[in-house]
Amino acid sequence: MSDYDVIVIGSGAGGGTLVRRLAPSGKRILLLERGDWLPREPANWDAGPVFVDNRYVSEDTWYDADGKPFQPQIHYCVGGATKLYGAALYRLRAEDFGELLHYDGVSPAWPIRYEDMEPYYTLAEQLYQVHGARGEDPTEPRASAPYPFPAVRHEPRIQQLSDDLEAAGLHPFHAPCGVMLDEANMPFGRCVRCATCDGFPCLVHAKSDAEVLAVRPALEHPNVTLLTNAEAVRLETSRAGNEVTGVVVERDGRRETFHGDIVVVSCGAANSARLLLASGGGDAHPHGLANGSGQVGRNYMFHNSQAVLALSREENPTVFQKTLGLNDFYFSGGDVDYPLGNIQMVGKSQAQMYRGEKPIQTRLAPERTLDEVARHAVDFWLSTEDLPRAENRVTLRADGRISLAYNATNDRPKKRLYHELKSMLGHLGMHPDHLLPRHAYLKNEIPVAGVAHQAGTCRFGTDPATSVLDPDCRAHDVDNLYVVDTSFFPSIGAVNPALTAMANALRVGEHIAGRIGAQVGQWEAAHAA
Ligand SMILES: Cc1cc2nc3c(=O)[nH]c(=O)nc-3n(C[C@H](O)[C@H](O)[C@H](O)COP(=O)(O)OP(=O)(O)OC[C@H]3O[C@@H](n4cnc5c(N)ncnc54)[C@H](O)[C@@H]3O)c2cc1C
Ligand code: SF4
C-alpha cells in the first residue's frame, strides 16, 4: 500500500487550493513544499527589504537562451507566489476559452468551455473571499453568483479617475480584490488597507493568499501532512512508465522517496516543466516524463506587460490603489479590431522605491523632486496577451538548472494599449506627456515584471500529440499524474492568472476526489474546519 492517497508538490495557487479541496475527505494527503513558511516580521511591509533587497525572492539562478544567468523573481515559500501577489482575482473572459484572433496570430481554444469552469470560479471567489461588483465591466463573463464581498471602495483620486474615464465614454470597474477588508466595520476587519500590499507579503495575514486560506485550513485536518524545505527532484515510474511510483525529495541535505496513489505536480509553470523533464528516461519516457508529445516546457507565456507611471496634476494621496480596472480595449481598441488588453492599477509607488541619482531625476522629472513625483504618481499596469509559441520554452541545462527561451509576441498591441492610455491622460487630470515605464524611476521594479505570470508549459487538450495533459489535467501518458498550476493554460488571456489556477484546482480536485472515492462533493464539506 502507498504511504499516501495523494501527494501534491507545491503549495501555491494550484497545489494549495487542491489540498484545501481534498482535505475534508479524510484521505492521506502529503503536501511537499520546497520553501519554508514566509517569516512574519516588520520587514514584510518595508519597501527597502522587499523592493530593493529582494528579501523574499529566491536565490535560484536561471539562464536565458544565450546562456546568460539571471535571478528569476520567484518565491519559494508556503503559498508560493500568492504570498506576494497583488490579489487581483479576475476570471478569464468567456471568449478567452475559445479561439481568438490577435495581431500576431491565434490564441488557441481551451478543451473546456467557460461554462465548464464557471461553477469553480464561483467557488474560488468564495474560498478566496473576493470583493467586487458585477455588471460594471462589459467584458465580464456570466457569473452564477454575486461576488461574496462588496467591491473595495476607490479612494478619492481613483474615484475621480473612474469618473473621468466614464465621462470619456469608457467603462471603468471596481477591480476584483482578494483582501479581507470590512469597510463597514474597520475595527473588526483584518485588512487595514495599507500601502504595502501589491508585491509585499501581508504582515497581518489579511491577504487572500494560498497559505492563509488554503494551506493553513487544510492542515487543521489530521489526514493532511505538510513538509517544508522539501524539494521534489525526480518522479520515479513503473517499468511500463504509465504510473508514478515514487517522488524523490531532497530535504535537509538527504534524499528520501515518498509513495502516493495519485501524484499532483504544482511547482509553478517553469519548475513543473523542470521536474517532468528531469524525470522519466528509459524507453517509456526518453525525453522526460509525460512528454510523448514533446510539448513539456513549450508554449511558455507570462503576459506582455508594462508597469507605467503617470503624473497627476493634483497630488495623489491614494494608499491602496489597486481598486480600478478597465477592459474597454480587451478585444479591440480605437481604430483597430485586434485585442489590446487590460488596464489596471498597480500598488502606489513610494519615494523610497525611487532611484535617487541626480541625472535620472533631471532627465525624468526636470522640474520636480522625486518626493514630488511620488506624491503625484498614478501607477498603471497594462497587460497584453502573449501567444503560445513552441520555441518559447523551458529546457534543462546539463547541470539540471532551468534555461528559458522567450521572444515576445503582440508587441504592436502592447504599444497601442500604451498609446490609448497616454492619449487620454489630458482628460484624466494628468500631465499629457508623462507616461513612463516605472523601471525608469524605481530602484527595482516590483517583481511582477519577472516571471510572476508564468504559464503554459504543460498545456491541456484532447489530443495527446499536441498537449501534455487531458482535459482533467491528467498526463496523457501517465495514469496517476496530474498538473494543476498555471502550466495547464493553453492561452493566458490578458487578465491576471491566479483565480483561474485556483478555480481549476477545485475542478480537478473534484475529479480526483471522485477517482479515489472521497466524499467532498459538497463545497460545504470542503469548508468545514
Ligand atoms: C509580485 C506578484 C504579484 C502578482 N499579482 C497577481 C495578481 O494581482 N493577480 C493574479 O491573479 N496573479 C498575480 N500574480 C501571479 C500569481 O501569484 C500566480 O499566477 C500564481 O501564484 C501561480 O500559481 P501556481 O500554483 O502556478 O504557482 P505558485 O503559486 O508559484 O506555486 C508554486 C509552488 O511550488 C513550489 N515549488 C516549486 N518547485 C518545487 C519543487 N521542486 N518541490 C516542491 N515545491 C516546489 C514553490 O515554492 C511554490 O510554493 C502575482 C505574482 C507575483 C510574484
Ligand atoms: S492592504 Fe490589507 S491585505 Fe494588503 S497588505 Fe495591507 S493589510 Fe494586508
Image: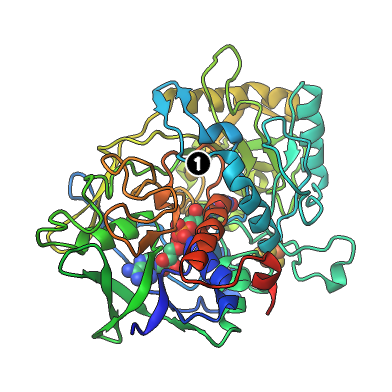
Query: Is 46 drawn above or below residue 108 in the view shown?
Result: below
Query: Is 144 drawn above or below residue 139 in the view shown?
Result: below
Occupied quadrant, residue 125: bottom right
Quarter of the image for the N terminus: give it: bottom left
Where is residue 284? Give x, y as percent.
Answer: 15, 58
Q: How is the image coloured?
A: rainbow
Q: Amino acid at mark 1?
A: Ile
Q: Is residue 525 left or right of residue 517?
A: right
**Relative depth, front residue between 393 and 461:** 461
Occupied quadrant, residue 316: top right
Q: Residue at x 51, y 65 (%)?
A: 514
Q: Residue at x 67, y 65 (%)?
A: 523
Q: Is residue 57 visible?
A: no
Q: Which residue position is annotated with label 1? A: 112
Occupied quadrant, residue 237: bottom left
Image quadrant of ligand 2 equals: bottom right
**Relative depth, front residue between 124 and 384:** 124
Q: Residue furthest front?
A: 517
